[in-house]
Image (cartoon, coloured by chain):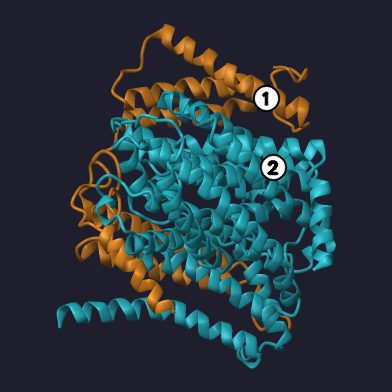
Amino acid sequence: MLAALSRLHIATAGRLGSGPALGPKPNTEMPMSGLPNQSSQTLVGAGVGIVGAVMAWGATFISSDAGYAGVGPNALPWLVSAVLIICGGWLVWEARSGGYREMEEPSGAASGDWPAVVWVVGGIVANASLITTIGFILSCGLCFALAVRGLRVAEGQGGGGLKRSVIDLLTGVAIAAPVFWMFTKLLAINLPGLTASGWL
Amino acid sequence: MIDLWNQLMGGFATAGTPINLLWAFLGCVIGTGIGVLPGLGPAVTVAMLLPITSQVEPTASMIFFAGIYYGAMYGGSTTSILLNTPGETGTMVTALEGFKMAKSGRAGAALATAAIGSFVAGTIATILVTLFAPVVADFAVTLGPPEYFLLMLLAFTTVSAVLGKSTLRGMTSLFIGLALGLIGLDQITGQVRYTAGVPEFMDGIETVLVAVGLFAVGETLYMALYEGRSKQEINKLSSVHMTRGEWKRSIPAWLRGTLIGFPFGTIPAGGSEIPTFLSYAVERKLSKHQHEFGTTGAIEGVAGPEAANNAAVTATLVPLLTLGIPTSVTAAILLSALQNYGIQAGPQLFTTSSTLVWALIASLYIGNVMLLVLNLPLVGLWVKLLKIPKPQLYAGILIFATVGVYGMRQSAFDLFLMLGLGLAGVVMRRFDFPTAPIVVGMILGPLAEAQGRNALSIGSGHWGVFVERPLSLGLLGLLAAVLVLPKLWKLLQLRKRVG
């Protein structure tokens, strides 16, 4: 029954191959800007391998006290690190020998819009660093303004001037404030405020 | 049978209280909204709302979350049909024929068959859940740790190896998920693992953090990095009704879709992708209107897969409630919601938390009716959501991400982790690594490890415990079949093509 199933599945996938984002296609474009296809794939594979190696190093600190089971708390960590090292190595091998197998073409532009994403990342970092000092509403408003700017740059509209940014900040505050009130007042869930009043 | 009826009626009594009806309604509204909007799925939304588990009582919040899960399926088909950007893998097939129908001016009929089909399939599937879940639970009581361990392995395998195109990348994702699940205290010995001295790591990594980071933040960053200039066309909405002929073509497709979808939801086969494709293939084969497929859009190609999708989604509740095994990302997050309450999903759930279970099942019947009303006459309202400009939409998602992640543990450190996971999400999407195995691996991993070690304790350290019991031996065979058969089949196909 399983065999029949997978046949149908494969058959459909094949027939739908002309549809959007379906069916494997040879990946010829560069997935990350600046690096050729092979190198970036190798890098990702190496990254997986390194995670595995770090896990293995960490596993040496875990006790092997097995009790009745014969396998202790360090068994799964060793297994996970071993598999990750193997997967990493395999990925590197695939990358070096013609690229990852059965890759689906990633959607969107061939190269990344780095200035745009820096604005968005900046917004999240600002939010994470300031939330406990200036409170949820203002911090999220700032995050929103920075992120909107980045996303607008990504659309090719340009970031806009000071007036635009002030409007964005106010929009962000207008979204964050009701959310904040709903969580703190209605659901009694702790979110940081600038004052202890629970309103700001 | 009488007993079942009484319990179901009890469930309706609990779910029918004004406050619970309000939660169900709220869930359906939010679910439809996020289903329509690109960028947010039911999994992330439920994850973001997990902090409410510290305040809202379990029955109400499970009804709420189930409403979101369900609503997103209804809303997702609207976007697939009008925008051709399926938000969920389950509605991917709907986009194929639905978008073509909408393009040739039959958006209304496509939306109607999707919504009514979802209702029919959802209701039939809920009836099946009502009938079968208690039976499965009764049977599941007899399962021991070895069987549970193997069932969980089966879930891992199907989620990571069978569904994705590349087994290697699926396995990589799964083991990264398992690695994330290792952080924190070992469940059995209480030993500290991989905390690197960071106190925040002691309790492990929150589900909401991983889901929100990978999906919501990852999506936003990906948008800024790669998709800013991708333009989309929105199809025009036409009046939502079906002609007599369209009804006649839809009804059998709905029923077939339900029959295909339900069994797939109940087995650990990772959600609704396979049944929707399968239903599409069946409808295409049986249809008398072959010329419409892929050209002007065939209504069967929308009706069948939509029904299959909803039936599968509903059926995932069977393994979730009776075995505690999630078969989709959203189910995994519902499981962690239960864990937040200290409720152990599993066969005992039907006896220890029977009020909750039956209220949840009853709320599915109610939710389906609410969703039909919300989606058919009001579809025009939902379509307006698509007018929100992308920058504001995605930046707004970041605010909600902050609420979910920060609200869970009140730790700003988690917000940095969220950013890290978001960046990882971008890399995964760019290099075509599946993300579902990460979430499933992280949530199910610690449970599987505990079951595995308990099983070995029972066998006093002998691995023979997995082959000595007939049921676990059978599961072992199934596991091997799932791993080997698809590959073998591919190989045979290749050889046939070559030879």
Q: Rounded to the nearest whole Å, what is the CA distance between mark 2 and mark 1? A: 20 Å
Label 1 secondary element: helix
Observer-nearest of A113 and B400: B400
Same chain check for tags 2 and 1: no
What residue is shown with label 1? A180
Looking at the rendered image, the disc whose residue lies closer to the viewer, 2 or 1, is 2
Observer-nearest of B54 and B450: B54
Residue B318, position as x, y percentages in the image: 65, 64
Task: Give above or below for B431 relative to B141.
Answer: above
Mark 1 belongs to chain: A
Q: Amino acid at mark 2?
A: Phe
Observer-nearest of A126 and B160: B160
**Marks 2 & 1, CB-CB < 8 Å contact:** no
Residue at x-position 67% and y-position 25%: A180
Mark 2 belongs to chain: B
Is disc 1 surrounded by few (<14), some (14 to 19) or many (20+) residues within 10 Å?
A: many
Residue A147, position as x, y percentages in the image: 45, 26
Colour of the chain lettered B: cyan
Label 2 secondary element: helix
Residue B219, position as x, y percentages in the image: 43, 40
Q: Is residue B9 left or right of residue B108?
A: right
The outermost residue toward the left is B499
What residue is shown with label 2? B64
Q: Is residue B86 left or right of residue A189?
A: left
Residue at x-position 26% and y-position 63%: A14
Is disc 2 surrounded by few (<14), some (14 to 19) or many (20+) residues within 10 Å?
A: many
Quarter of the image for residue A59 reads bottom right
Residue B332, position as x, y percentages in the image: 60, 56
Q: Amino acid at mark 1?
A: Phe
Residue at x-position 42% and y-position 69%: B162
